[in-house]
Structure formats: C-alpha cells, structure tokens
Image (tube, grey):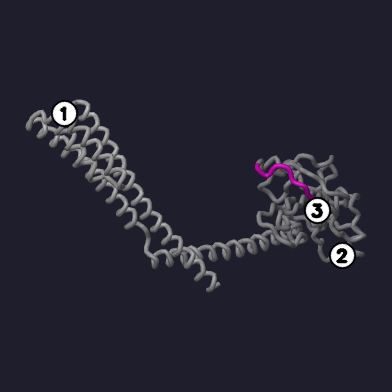
Amino acid sequence: MLFSRRYDCIVLLMLMLTTILVSQVIVASDLDDLDKAEFNEAITRARECVAAQNAGCVEAQLALAKRRAGSSKDKALIEQIRSAGMTSSTDNGEQQASNERAVIRAQEQRRQSVRQARIDADATQAANQPSTADAIRSAGAQMNQQLAIQLAEKQYAQERRAENQQRAQRAERVEPVRKPAAYDQAKPASVQPIAASSPPALPSAAKPVTPAKTTGTPTQPEALAFCWQTKRGGWLCDGPGDETTLAEKDQAGQLSGVGCRTPSLSVPTSITLTSTRVKKRGSVSGWLYRCGNQLKPGDTSHATWNRDIRRFWSGIPG
C-alpha cells in the first residue's frame, strides 16, 4: 500500500510538471502568433500608404513591421516596400506624418495592452497550480477517504445481512412454517452457487416442483424468491422478506437473508424476468425458487416482510 501511494504521488508530480511545460510552450506560441499577425497588419497598411503616395505613413508602418519581423524574409519584404514607397511618392508634409505617428503609437499601445493581458492571465493560471506538497497531501486524503468508504460499505453489508437474518427469525416465531417431511430426512448445508448454464445443487429430498403444505390460507399464493448473478459472480436475490443490494458469493446466505429459508427450484432451468419496480434493471436471467410457505393475508408490497415478488417481476409462470 505504501509503494502504491508513493507511485501515485510520483505520477501526479510528473503530470503537474508536464502541464506547466505545456503552458509555457502555449504562451510562447501565442506571442509568436501575435507578432506575426501584427507584422502582416503593418505590411498591409504600408502598402495602402504606398498606393496613397503617403511617405510618412509608409515609414511609420514599416517601422512597426520591423519591430515584429521574425525572419530575413520579413526584413527583405520591408526593404522592398520601402523602395517602392520612395520611388512612387514624396513626403506630403510634416503634419500628416505627425498624425500617422500618433495613430501608430495608439495602435502600439493597444497591442501592448493585449500582450500584457495575456501574460498576466498565464501568470495567474500558473500561480493557481497546486504545489507538489499540496498535491501529495490531497492524493493521500483521497486514498484515505476511499479506504474509509470501502470499510463503511463492508460494515453496512454485514449489518444488513445480520438484520435480514433477524427479520427471518422473527417472522418464523410469529407464524412457524411447517416444513416438508423430506426436509427432516436430508437437511442441506447450503445452496451452492451455480453457473449460468446449470441449476444449483439442491438436496435430492427437496422436490423442485411440489409446493410444500403450509398452515396459511389455501387461497394465498406461495412465497417465491428470484436470484441472479452479477458480472463478477456475486449473487443478488429478491424474496418475501427483503431484497439484497450488495452482491455476495454465498447464494444460500442471500436466499436466507431475503426470507427464503427452505428454497426449492420452481422451474428446472434458468428463467428471464423483467423488473417492473426498478425500470433501469431491465430483463435479468436467473433462478426462481419456491420458499416452502405461503404469503400472509394483507399487504404484500415491497416495504413489508410479506413481499410478493410477482408484483415486482413480469414473466413469472402462473
């Protein structure tokens, strides 16, 4: 665990350094792009000044372009336009040149403001990056939080399983269930987990198709339970006493936890049912069990210990 934490911290530090380097490269690229755009704009204005035969304007724009020139090709272009301006026009007066220089100064101030704003924004972003020590402390806190959540989930599952067993025991004390005679001859230790293509191993004495006689009212339906496996091989069950929310490897324990203490297969093969209570669950393939007792008269909704899963699943044989 200590090695894993050190490794996570090293990976986090490398990611932070990479982010800082990439930010610096992006800043340099943005400044180069801005210089190129300003050079092209100055060249365009200089050509317009040449066409208007305004030498003062030509010189002012070429001076700005020279400050943004980044290659020998750019400098050669400046000299070419300067030569064309000298041969095609003369100075139209000191006042016009002064006005052009004022315009150029205003443009330069605006560009400097934009450049400074970008530099300040990048500096602020870099300053907001967490330090290495803060990142390490944050990563450690997240790991501790995940461990605490896992421990709490495990403890909750144990408490929920114990509570389900207590519910089943209390329900039996209120109305004892008459067990089949064959049950006393061969009591199974547990119901073994099953593969998706074969039924679970039940004791030979437990007849899967013969419902047990009970002391309940004959018109009451028999209690049923439905179990299915998750992708990781854990079992979930829905029965007369409760519905499991955490998958477990022990299918017999899950059946007992949902109030099906003497299960026997209702049909000899797996069956696909569709959840009508939990819409996002959709259709699930699993195993349908008889629980050896009838439901009590009265409320059979999901919020009771007398749950009729026929109300929550469609596709159960009549």
Give above or below for 86 relative to 195: above
CA gap between label 1 and label 2 equals 114 Å
**Residue 79 — which label?**
none
Residue placed farthest to the top in the image? 52
Q: Position of residue 49 (x, y in %)?
A: 20, 30
Q: Earlier in the sequence, mark 2 or mark 3?
A: 2
Residue bearing the label numbered 2: 187
User: The residue under label 1 is which amino acid type?
Assistant: Ser
Q: Please check the rendered image and state whether residue 281 is part of the magenta-colored stretch, yes or no.
A: yes
User: The residue under label 3 is which amino acid type?
Assistant: Ala
CA gap between label 1 and label 3 equals 93 Å
Drawn side of residue 179 relative to residue 295, left or right = right
Q: Which residues are magenta?
A: 280-286
Give the residue at x 66% y 57%.
246
Q: Nearer the viewer, residue 88 or 165?
A: 88
Give above or below for 95 relative to 304: above
Count the numbered circles shown.
3
Q: Earlier in the sequence, mark 1 or mark 2?
A: 1
User: The residue under label 2 is which amino acid type?
Assistant: Lys
Residue bearing the label numbered 3: 196
Q: Do callouts 1 and 2 mark residues in contact (Cβ within 8 Å)?
A: no
Q: Position of residue 38 (x, y in %)?
A: 27, 40
Residue bearing the label numbered 1: 89
CA gap between label 2 and label 3 equals 25 Å
Give the residue at x 90% y 65%.
186
Instruction: Identify the element where label 1 is drawn.
Output: loop
**Front of the two marks 1 and 2:** 1
Give the residue at x 81% y 62%.
192
Please rate how many residues cluster around mark 3, counting C-alpha atoms within 10 Å: few if below 14, some from 14 to 19, many from 20: some
